[in-house]
Image (spheres, helix red, strand yellow):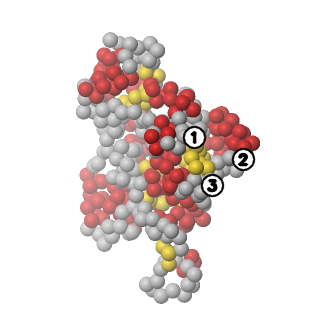
Amino acid sequence: MIPYGRQDITESDIQAVVDVLQSEFLTQGPTVERFERRVANYCGASNALALNSSTSSLHLACLALDVGPGDIVWTSPITFVASSNCALYCGAEIDFVDIDPITYNICCDKLAEKLHVAKLKGTLPKVVIPVHLTGQSCDMEKISKLGLQYGFRIIEDASHAIGGHYNGQRVGSCKYSDICVFSFHPVKIITTGEGGMILTNSDELAVKMKHLRSHGITRDPVYMTNKDPCPWYYEQIALGFNYRMTDIQAAIGLSQLNRLDEYVSIRNQLSKRYDLLLADLPVITPFQSQNCYSSRHLYVIRLRLDVIAKSRREVFDYLREQGVGVIIHYIPIPSQPYYKDMGFSEKSYPNSLSYYNEAISLPLFPKMTQQQQDKVVSLLKEILLQ
């Protein structure tokens, strides 16, 4: 089976873990701090906080922006459910903005229209969470301007996008947002096994999220009520969580960071090769904005179902049967039973529904060979041109 994604673990990654295992700290040690500094410096952000998942990162980002009951958060229908669940964790309401039919990211025109109507109704969002689907940044400059106009805060869900650029800035710089989050799941650009990262240029938000990451506890007298504490003393100053990353995970991340740019370059090379190999087939290949350099986490094609004699399910099943691990990213969140019970319907987001009905993610990972890629394309030709 050729998987749709696969981690690349090297001897240097393994040795980095061994070094931590032989050190004094397996968790809450210096390796996590080194990982955080490296990511912050790489992205050009003031602060970075390592967490145990991107989902935890989204949750803390919402809490840091004081999202709670009575608030509204908007995001894209085409993303993993964590992008919207994070608002529900805080007791807020969630709503969705349909995607752009070309980039598959949140549509800025539809966002502007929805904001205009929401202002008239008094239902403006407190936070908007743009999702950089497949690794290509949303049009953050436009979203930022809308944020200033309508007064909402911005969390970039960049789970797919570490290593990418937008307007000459690295994704994660937070130039156009309050907070940005990354994912280090094994199929992402780099991995820590499981893990996430929060970036922000606000020291105040960073301190707040640092406390929330570890039970809401601090040992820093600056934040305590007791300004003359004993050496063993600590205070819980907020209702926090155990969302910490271990030093073992951070060691893998530090090692993988050394290959991040190489991984992104290879993903772009493979994606461009797919573009050429698929040019004559009845599929739509991914559009790339001129002001973006995508990290190319995913390579999603859309089937031209109007001109082929096969259904998406037939194409999907055939490729799977032949050992190609295609997958679908993503089922629209409003179509999930939990969200349908809340009153949502995927039919309210026609671009997202159209995309979902036609989309297939082809295998893409740094160690993918041209022979594997040729096999994927050859099998795709067989089923599409029958």
Quarter of the figure with the N terminus: top left
Quarter of the figure with the C terminus: top left
Q: Residue at x 52, y 33 (%)?
A: 346
Contact? badges 3 and 2 (CB < 8 Å) = no
Q: Earlier in the sequence, mark 1 or mark 2?
A: 1
Image side of residue 316 versus residue 126, left or right: left
Residue 44 appearing in the image: no
Determine crowd level at label 1: few under 14, some 14-19, many 20+ residues with C-alpha closer than 10 A. many
Q: CA distance from mark 3 to mark 1?
A: 17 Å
Residue 181 or 254: which is nearer the viewer?
Answer: 181
Q: Which residue is mark 1?
A: 96
Residue 7 or 106: which is nearer the viewer?
Answer: 106
Q: Residue at x 54, y 87 (%)?
A: 228
Q: Earlier in the sequence, mark 3 or mark 1?
A: 3
Residue 355 or 292: which is nearer the viewer?
Answer: 355
Contact? badges 3 and 1 (CB < 8 Å) = no
Determine crowd level at label 3: few under 14, some 14-19, many 20+ residues with C-alpha closer than 10 A. few
Res. 122 mark: 2
Count of labels in the image: 3
Q: Earlier in the sequence, mark 3 or mark 2?
A: 3
* Mark 2 residue element: loop
Amino acid carrying label 2: it is Gly
* Mark 1 residue element: strand
Q: CA distance from mark 3 to mark 2?
A: 12 Å
The nearer-to-camera label among 1 and 2 is 2
Res. 70 mark: 3
Amino acid carrying label 3: it is Gly
Res. 369 mark: none
Q: Residue at x 45, y 26 (%)?
A: 357
